Image: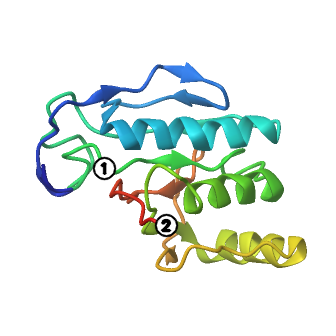
Amino acid sequence: MGVPWGGKLVNGVQLPKSGPGYRFVRYGQWGTGRMIKGIEYIGAQVAAAGGTMEVGDISYKSGGLIRRHKSHQNGRDVDIFFIGGTGQFDVAKNWRLVRAAVENPNFKATNIFVSNERRAQLLREASELHSGVSRPGTRMTSAKPFTSAERTPISNSVSATKRPQN
């Protein structure tokens, strides 16, 4: 309920610690039903490409403030980390992850935060595959490079609003 930066989670669903193509690595692992199904969908797409993504913060069971975030209060935001982190970035697998987030049937991704360098690599991959992002309204936003030696974030803001019917 409410906006991602000032709400609470009602009837939250817990993401299992691991599943096909993903493992949970941080704090609050609760989200809306659509968010959890969407994360599992992305994980399945990543697994089909031979990868495993790391899922970070979603929300606490009842929502509210979560460590390191102003948002993530109502289960409609998720941190998903690039496959391979900063040292072994796999462009093909990470493009599959981005595409699965953008074309997710469970929610509408509104922002994907990524460094300029990674953004350019991902867009080159999309262009080479002739498979550009096909969901209008999603922005791959340039952000300051993440400095952690272990992980690079892909998304801090994924909206779990109902997907428009075509």
- Of residues 27 and 77, the one drawn nearer to the viewer in this rendering: 77
Task: Say what secondary structure mark 1 lies in.
Answer: loop
Q: Residue at x 31, y 27 (%)?
A: 13
Q: Position of residue 36 (x, y in %)?
A: 42, 36
Q: Residue at x 59, y 60 (%)?
A: 103
Residues at discs 2 and 1 in contact (Cβ within 8 Å): no
Locate residue 80, reporting x and y percent. Answer: 51, 47
Mark 2 vs 1, N-terminal side: 1
Residue 103 in view (yes/no): yes
Q: Is residue 128 above or below residue 14?
A: below
Question: Where residue 150 sits in the image (x, y, percent)?
Answer: 59, 42
Q: Is residue 30 left or right of residue 83?
A: left
The residue furthest top is: 17
Residue 140 position (above or below residue 162)? below
x 40%, y 47%: residue: 78
> In the rendered structure, which amino acid carries the disc numbered 2?
Phe
Q: How is the image coloured?
A: rainbow
Q: Looking at the image, is 20 positioned above or below residue 55?
A: above
Who's the residue at 73% across and 69% down the image?
A: 122
Q: Position of residue 24 (x, y in %)?
A: 49, 28
Q: Residues within 10 Å of mark 2 (few under 14, many from 20)?
A: many
**Which label sits on residue 113?**
2
Mark 1 lies on residue: 76
